[in-house]
Amino acid sequence: MPAPRAVSKAFLRYRSVASDYRQARLARLRAAQNADGGWGYFPKRHSWLEPTCYALLALHKDAGSEQAWRRGWELVRSWQLADGSWKPSANVATSGWATALCVTLHCVQGLFDQPFHRGAEWMLQTRGSEGSLLERAINLVRPLPVEYDRRFKGWPWHPETTSWVEPTAHSVLALKKSAAKLPGAAARIEEAERMMADRRAKDGGWNYGNRRVLNVDLPSFPETTAIALLGLQGSKVVDLEPALLLAGRHLRQTRSPLAKAWLGISLRNFGRDLPPPAASEPGDDLLLAALEALAYPQGGHQWLKAG
Amino acid sequence: MAQSRLTTRRAFFPLAGAALAAGCSRTRRANSAVFIAKAASYTADLARLMESGIQACGLEVRGKNILLKPNLVEFDPATAINTHAAVIAAAFEVFRKLGAASIRIGEGPGHRRDTLFLAEEAKYRESLSGFESFFVDLNRDDVSAVKGFADREEIYLPNTALGADLIVSLAKMKTHHWAGATLSMKNLFGLTPGSVYGWPKNLLHQVGIPRSIVELNRIFRKTFAIVDGVVGMEGNGPIQGTPKPCGVLVMGPDVAAVDATCCRIMGINPAKVTYLQMAGELGHTEESHIEQRGESIASVRTPFALIEEFRHIRLA
C-alpha cells in the first residue's frame, strides 16, 4: 500500500533529520571542549561550570562521547570548594548557584559519595537573604514596593543575596533527585515550592522572580517558566496545569532559541508531545547547543526529571 | 544644534579658564563639557550630530579600542526601553570614521538571558551588518577580579570591558523607579556578569543602587556618555514606563555632568538624585561647573512624569 510506505519514509526522514540535529550539537560540544576538560559559554573561552554541566548532561551515555565526558567530569569534581559548594569558573573563587547542577549530575550517575553529600548539605544550608525580622516588620507597617511573601525562601544566584526563581528551580530539582539519600531535604523542597508559588506571575508563569512591583503585575518569561516547571515537577503545592498550558503557548510564540530549548526540555519531561525541531546547524553558543541537544526527543531531557 | 557654535569663544574660554584654575589649585577641577544636540526623530542624521558632540568635547578616538555599551534590558515593541538601534548604528559609524582601532558592542541584560535574541528583537542585528562578529554578551564573557567594590573585597568584571581603552555608555534617557533616573552612569550595571551574579544582578541591589552606580563608574573611568533622549521613558521606568519624546542626544566625557544635564532637561533636580549626590569625586553636577555646548538646556527642556515616590526630586 503506497500510503503507509510514504508515511514510513517521512518518519524515517524525520528520524534522520532529528538525529542529525542532536548529533550535530554533540559533535559541536566535543569539538569545543577546552584543554582543561570544561566548556566555555563560547568556543575558545575559559571554562565555566554552567555550560560544562549542561554539556555533560547532553553527552551523558552518548556512545562516542565517553572520553569527553570523563574529562569534563574530572574538571567538575576538581572545582568543589572546601565548604561543599562549586565555584563558577577556575578564577572565580566564590560559591555558585550551579552547585545545584553538580548535585544533579551526581544523581544522574547514581553517585552518592562524599562530594555529593557535601554539595547537597551546602545547598540545604544556603538560602536567600530576604525576609529578616526587620524587613518583615516594615512590610507589615508599610508594604514594600516589591510584593512577595518574605516567609518563603529559595536559593540565591550569589551568596548573601535574595532568592530568585531560576537558582531555586535548579536547587529544588537537585534536592528532589537527591531526596532518597537526603532525609533533611523535604522541608526545604516544600518551602522553595511555596516560594515559587508565591512568586508566580499573574499570567500563570514565572519571570526572574518578581510578580508585582509598585502595583504593576509583571509578565512571565518563556525560559523561566520552563525552568520553574522543571523544579516543580511532582509538586503538591502548585497547580501546574495552567502553567503547562502557558508554556505551550510560549513555545508556539517565542522566537528565542534559548526559551525554545528550555521549553522543549521541560514540556517533554511533563510528557507533552512536541513537534520535532527544525533542522539547523548549531551556533557558537555552547550552552544553547547543549540545551538544544537535551531538548531533542530522547536527547537527555530525562536527566532533568525529578525523582 | 548649530555646529558653528562649537568654535565660538563662548565655547572655548570657560574651559580654558577652568583648566587654568585647575593648574593653580590642585583641588579644583576643570569644568566639564556637555553637548546637547536636537534630534527630532531617529531618522535624523545622528552620526553627524554625534561627531559634532565628540569634537566639541575634545574626545580623542584614534587608535583606541572602543566598547559601545547600549542599554538593552527587555523588549516590548509598544514602549521605549532600550537604546534605539539607530543610535547604536550611528555611534558605530562615527567611532569607525574617527579612527578607532576596534569597536565592540557589549551588553549584559539584567533580566533575560538570551541576549542575542534581545538584540534581534531590538533590531540591533538588522541595523548593523555583521553584528554578531563584534557583539559580546557581557553576562557570559570571561572575567577578572577587581579589588574593592563598596564594602566588598572584590568584584568580577568582564575582560572585554576591563580591556577597553574607552567605554561609550550609550544610555537611554529614562526615569527609574528605584534610582529616580537611569542615564549614562546607571547604564554600567550591564557590565556586571550574570555568570557570577545572576539575573538580576542582585549584588548591586544589596550594596545599594546609588553606591553601586558610583562604584562601577569609579572602576570604569575611561568613559564617554551618549544619552539617547530622542524618545525617552517617563513614569514607572526603566521598563514599565511610557515613551516620552524629548528630541535630544546628550554627550560628554564627564558622565556625572552628562547625567546632571539630562536630569535638568527632564525636569529633575540632580542635587536630589542620590547617586549624583554621591558622584562628587567622579565629576561635576553643579550647573556652574558644566560647560554647555550645542543647544541650551532651556531650549530642549521636557519635564518627564515622575512616580509618586520620586515627586520630591522635581526641579523647582
Image: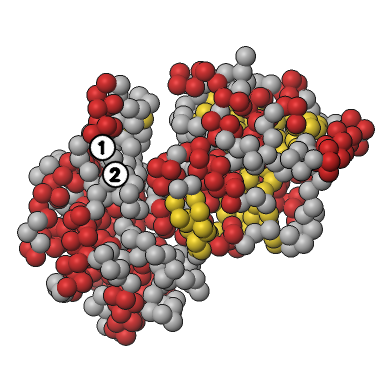
| Side of A32 relative to B252 (left or right) | left
User: Would you call the spot at circle 1 few (<14 residues within 10 Å), some (14-19), or many (20 or more)?
Assistant: few
Q: Position of residue A11 (x, y in %)?
A: 27, 68
C-alpha separation, residue under disc 1 versus residue under disc 2 = 7 Å
Q: Nearest the camera: A251 or B237? A: B237
User: Element under label 2?
Assistant: loop
Does residue A228 show up? no
User: Element under label 1?
Assistant: loop
Q: Is residue B247 above or below residue A285?
A: above
Q: Position of residue B193 (x, y in %)?
A: 47, 55
Residue matched to label 2: A129
**Same chain for the residues under marks 1 and 2 in the image:** yes
Q: Is residue A37 above or below residue A106?
A: below
Callout 1: chain: A
The amino acid sitting under disc 2 is Ser
Going by the picture, which residue comes out furthest to the top? B316
Callout 2: chain: A
Residue name at image x 32 percent, y 76 percent? A78
Q: Nearest the camera: A200 or B40? A: A200
Q: Position of residue B212 (x, y in %)?
A: 50, 43
The amino acid sitting under disc 1 is Ser
Residue name at image x 51 percent, y 63 percent? B144
Q: Is residue B143 above or below residue A47?
A: above
| Label pair 1/2, CB-CB below 8 angstroms | yes
| Side of B140 relative to B253 (left or right) | left
Does residue B259 show up? yes
Residue matched to label 1: A132
